[in-house]
Image (tube, grey):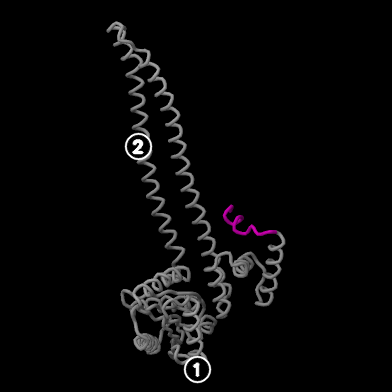
């Protein structure tokens, strides 16, 4: 809960202004100002998390934002915040425990070292052997043994903490993966895609070899959801995600970036090759009617696809914008077709 409080701590005047904007946007969009919609619109307008804001913006722009989508986005948002908070808390507790143990060991060791120094300095060559042996057995050796035992305890504690840290790092890595993965299709989400595309762009600049970006959108998906329900809509999204995964090779990347919109990155691919891949995917989807249960009539699924090539050293937004414009050209030209940046 503290994580959420800290997340939404905005100066009073800015908070009131943002809250008013949220209420106005909710009224314009036709949604009630319940906690779920208010939180999501607050995230969207406040851009507290750019990736989440982009997901919400995409859903609103493509008119796929509804009660079902809102609940999915809300669950994802809170799962991410809670996961981050718990992992951070566990790391802090483990580190603080180890630091406290080391500080206690250092204090106790200093006391023992001072005691040992004082006792050793008290020894004299003139001391009778019997007395010297007794002092060694009764004072000095027990102090040394105690010091050794404490050192061994410290070593064991450090090893234990090391194992705890490894386990926490593993859990954190898993939580990070979940935050970057679309739970419905198991593909990277917008957050994961942005990380991947940056890596692909960096490699393209380094090797001076371009790559292609395909943006795919299911035609009339809102109508499918309205007619068949969200369960069928979700099943179609999973079907398409699997098909796209099977149609791409090892070095290619597929992601779901919001609603019914997917993106594919094709490294080391020429423009003509990218158009060919897009056309193959389009034809394969259009050639198969999807038979649903409960005596629904078959669904004829089609895709519109936009294609653009990365120009070395250009910003991501420029590349994405050309691919997105190509997609909308495909949509406006009748859907179920591929358009590339040279068609713009």
Q: Is residue 344 magenta?
A: no
Within 10 Å of disc 1 (Cα), the crowding (few <14, some 14-19, many 20+) is few
Disc 2: which residue:
156
* Disc 2, SS: helix
Position of 294 compared to 125: left or right?
right
Position of 270 compared to 10: left or right?
left
Dots 2 and 1: beta carbons under 8 Å? no
Q: Is residue 4 magenta?
A: yes
Say which quarter of the image contains residue 140: top left
Q: Residue at x 43, y 31 (%)?
A: 106
Q: Residue at x 43, y 27 (%)?
A: 108
Position of 34 compared to 199: left or right?
right
Q: Residue furthest left?
A: 129
Say which quarter of the image contains residue 211: bottom left
Of the two numbered discs 2 and 1 on the same chain, state the one appearing first in sequence: 2
* Disc 1, SS: loop
Disc 1: which residue:
333
Counting from the top left corner in percent of width and height, residue 249 is at 31, 77
Looking at the rendering, the stretch of residues picked out in magenta corresponds to 1-11
The numbered mark at residue 183 is none
Counting from the top left corner in percent of width and height, residue 312 is at 41, 78
Q: CA distance from mark 2 to mark 1?
A: 70 Å
Counting from the top left corner in percent of width and height, residue 274 is at 37, 85
Within 10 Å of disc 2 (Cα), the crowding (few <14, some 14-19, many 20+) is few
Viewer-nearest residue: 29 or 67: 29
Counting from the top left corner in percent of width and height, residue 277 is at 35, 85
Decide: is 160 above or below 107: below
Q: Residue at x 65, y 59 (%)?
A: 10
Q: Residue at x 65, y 73 (%)?
A: 31
Viewer-nearest residue: 301 or 60: 60
Viewer-nearest residue: 108 or 26: 108
């Amino acid at each position: 809960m503290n994580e959420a409080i800290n997340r939404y701590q905005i100066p009073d005047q800015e908070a009131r202004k943002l809250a008013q904007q949220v209420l106005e946007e909710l009224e314009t969009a036709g949604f009630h100002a319940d906690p779920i919609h208010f939180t999501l619109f607050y995230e969207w307008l406040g851009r507290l998390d750019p990736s989440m804001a982009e997901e919400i913006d995409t859903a609103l722009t493509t008119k796929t934002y509804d009660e079902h989508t809102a609940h999915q986005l809300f669950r994802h948002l809170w799962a991410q915040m809670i996961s981050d908070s718990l992992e951070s808390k566990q790391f802090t507790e483990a580190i603080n425990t180890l630091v406290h143990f080391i500080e206690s060991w250092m204090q106790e060791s200093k006391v023992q070292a001072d005691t040992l120094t004082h006792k050793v300095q008290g020894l004299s060559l003139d001391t009778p052997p019997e007395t010297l042996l007794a002092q060694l057995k009764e004072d000095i050796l027990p102090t040394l043994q105690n010091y050794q035992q404490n050192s061994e305890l410290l070593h064991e504690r450090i090893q234990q903490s090391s194992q705890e840290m490894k386990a926490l790092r593993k859990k954190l890595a898993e939580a990070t993966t979940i935050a970057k993965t679309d739970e419905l299709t198991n593909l990277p989400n917008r957050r994961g895609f942005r990380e991947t595309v940056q890596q692909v762009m960096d490699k393209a600049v380094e090797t001076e070899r371009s790559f292609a970006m395909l943006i795919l959108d299911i035609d009339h998906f809102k109508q499918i959801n309205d007619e068949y329900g969200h369960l069928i809509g979700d099943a179609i999204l999973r079907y398409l995600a699997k098909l796209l995964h099977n149609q791409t090779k090892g070095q290619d990347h597929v992601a779901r970036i919001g609603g019914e919109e997917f993106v594919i990155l094709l490294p080391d691919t020429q423009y003509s090759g990218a158009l060919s891949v897009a056309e193959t995917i389009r034809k394969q989807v259009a050639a198969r009617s999807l038979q649903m249960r409960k005596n629904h009539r078959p669904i004829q699924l089609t895709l519109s696809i936009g294609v653009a090539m990365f120009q070395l050293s250009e910003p991501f937004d420029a590349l994405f914008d050309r691919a997105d414009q190509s997609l909308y050209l495909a949509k406006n030209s009748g859907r179920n077709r591929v358009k590339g940046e040279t068609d713009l």
